Image (cartoon, helix red, strand yellow):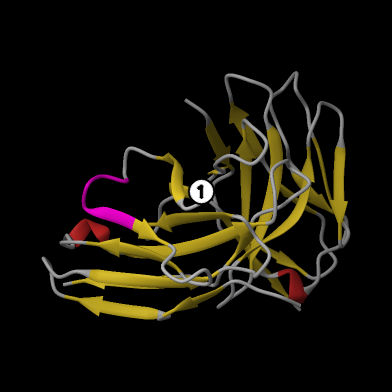
């Protein structure tokens, strides 16, 4: 079945550092890929998405590129802020509108 | 901005008791979902619901679970006889339509603790 694997966490960075959170996936078909973010006490929010190979999703300075050859969708940000501290989830869906399959989540803490 | 709401935020119950978790999806959304996250584990899909019936369910969603949209605004998840292993954060989600351009909007979750 489908699966998503994220890098082992948690991640602690200083403000303005470069962020990479790795995500790889296994899917039988041609999935759409997502990054969700969960701030403390809140629900999961869609951060960015990509629906086909080589698509780059971007939002709020975060980027991720759909790499079919390496089955990856790594999340990057050039300069993190304290307000980026949250849990980040990589996810996929095989069919438009169907269930989301999530990775383990990565806790990011950014220190001033 | 419209949002998905869930009540209660935390529910504590005794093993074997029935619990009902409540969700109010965004008003013009048509597709509804429940997910759960056991502490330290992945967020897992439980069930999806459309047009007043279950459209998809996972192997976790056994006969102890049921969902209902009783009044056109609420969407509930019932666990008939809770087990210790049902302790988890339960997330409700909704989406307006089909297709990945219609994202799933999540509620803040209900933390269920089974003693």
For residue B5, above or below residue A29: below
Q: Would you say A56 lies left or right of B54 here? A: right
The chain holding disc 1 is A
Residue plotted at (41% across, 52% down): B41
Q: Would you say B111 lies left or right of A23 here? A: left
Residue B45 visible in rendering: no
Q: Is residue B65 magenta?
A: yes
Q: Which residue is mark 1?
A: A104
Q: Residue A22 sits in which quadrant?
A: top right
Q: Would you say B39 lies left or right of A64 here? A: left
Q: Residue B91: x and y, percent?
A: 48, 63
Q: Is residue B28 magenta?
A: no
Residues A62 and A29: in front is A29
Q: Residue A15: x and y, percent?
A: 80, 71
Q: Residue B111 sits in which quadrant?
A: bottom left
For residue A109, above or below residue A77: below
Local crowd size for mark 1, using a 10 Å CA cut-off: few (<14), some (14–19), many (≥20):
many
Q: Secondary structure at mark 1?
A: loop
State which region is magenta.
B61-66
Q: Main secondary structure of the magenta part?
A: loop
Residue plotted at (82% across, 26% down): A53
For residue A33, above or below residue A112: above
Q: Would you say B1 lies left or right of B64 here? A: right
Residues B70 and B6: in front is B70
Residue plotted at (65% across, 39% down): A23
């Amino acid at each position: 079945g489908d699966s998503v694997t994220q890098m082992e966490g948690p991640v602690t960075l200083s403000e303005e550092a470069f962020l990479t959170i790795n995500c790889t996936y296994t899917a039988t078909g041609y999935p759409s890929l997502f990054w969700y973010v969960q701030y403390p006490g809140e629900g999961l929010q869609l951060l960015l998405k990509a629906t086909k190979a080589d698509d780059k999703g971007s939002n709020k300075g975060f980027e991720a590129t759909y790499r079919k050859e390496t089955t990856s969708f790594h999340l990057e940000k050039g300069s993190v802020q304290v307000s980026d501290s949250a849990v980040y989830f990589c996810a996929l869906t095989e069919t438009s509108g169907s269930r989301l399959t999530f990775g383990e989540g990565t806790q990011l803490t950014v220190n001033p | 901005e419209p949002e998905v709401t869930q009540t209660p935020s935390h529910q504590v119950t005794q093993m074997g008791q029935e619990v009902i978790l409540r969700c109010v999806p965004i008003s013009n959304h048509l597709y509804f979902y429940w997910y759960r996250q056991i502490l330290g584990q992945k967020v897992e899909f439980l069930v999806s619901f459309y047009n007043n019936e279950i459209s998809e369910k996972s192997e976790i969603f056994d006969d102890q679970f049921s969902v209902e949209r009783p009044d056109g605004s609420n969407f509930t998840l019932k666990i008939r006889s809770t087990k210790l292993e049902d302790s988890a954060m339960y997330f409700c989600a909704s989406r307006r339509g089909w297709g990945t351009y219609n994202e799933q909007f999540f509620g803040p979750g209900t933390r269920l603790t089974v003693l």
